[in-house]
């Protein structure tokens, strides 16, 4: 008989990273909207894009989508966001 049951899931700890500083304003900025692949996310992000432009003066929106919620963002997508955008909003919907 087993005397002790061990949890096979290890805990690697959490890396201490500072949060990115917030944008002081969205007016005139370019933002990325990242659809992480849940159903209807595109419909939700269509509305978010409209509101960002109408209410907050966002100049441009760059849209990207992951192939599925469990997949990582492709390196070229990450690089495009870093080179073209002031900020990114990662969104879910269902």
Image: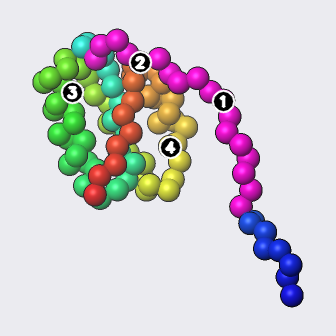
* Secondary element at image label 1: loop
Q: Which residue is at 58% across, 23% downward?
A: 18
Q: Which one is earlier in the sequence, the residue at label 4 or at label 3?
A: 3
Task: Tell which of 23 and 65 is nearer to you.
Answer: 23
Q: How far apart are marks 4 and 2 (CA)?
A: 22 Å
Residue 94 can be seen, yes or no: yes
Q: How is the image coloured?
A: rainbow
The residues tagged by marks 4 and 3 sit, at their Cα atoms, a distance apart of 23 Å
Quadrant in which residue 69 is drawn: bottom left
Q: Which of marks 3 and 1 is in front?
A: 1
Which label number is shown at residue 5? none
Instruction: Write the residue at 32% across / 20% down.
Output: 30
The 10 Å Cα crowd at callout 4, few under 14, some 14 to 19, many 20 or more, is some
Counting residues from the start of the chain, the first of labels 2 and 1 encountered is 1
What's the magenta region? Answer: 9-26
Q: How far apart are marks 2 and 1 (CA)?
A: 18 Å
Q: Which mark is residue 52?
A: 3
Q: Is mark 2 on a helix, strand or loop?
A: loop
Secondary structure character of the magenta stretch overall: loop
Q: Earlier in the sequence, mark 3 or mark 2?
A: 2
Mark 1 to mark 4: distance in Å? 22 Å
x and y percent of residue 6 in the render? 78, 69
Counting residues from the N terminus, which is met first, the one under dot 1 or under dot 4? 1
Q: Number of labelled discs?
A: 4
* Viewer-side label of 4, 3: 3
Up/down of 54 relative to 14, above or below: above
**Label 1 CA crowd tier, 10 Å (few <14, some 14–19, many 20+):** few
Write down the residue under mark 4. 73
Would you name the residue on which mark 2 appears? Answer: 22
Q: Give x and y (percent) for residue 55.
A: 14, 23
**Marks 3 and 1, the one that precedes in the sequence:** 1
């Amino acid at each position: 008989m087993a005397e002790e049951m061990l949890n096979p899931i290890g805990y690697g700890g959490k890396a201490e990273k500072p949060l990115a500083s917030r944008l002081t304003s969205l007016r005139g900025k370019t933002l990325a909207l990242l659809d992480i692949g849940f159903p209807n996310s595109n419909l939700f992000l269509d509305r978010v894009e409209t509101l960002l432009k109408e209410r907050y003066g966002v100049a441009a929106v760059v849209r990207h989508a992951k192939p599925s919620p469990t997949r990582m963002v492709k390196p070229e997508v990450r690089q495009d966001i870093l080179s073209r955008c002031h900020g990114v909003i990662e969104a879910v919907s269902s």
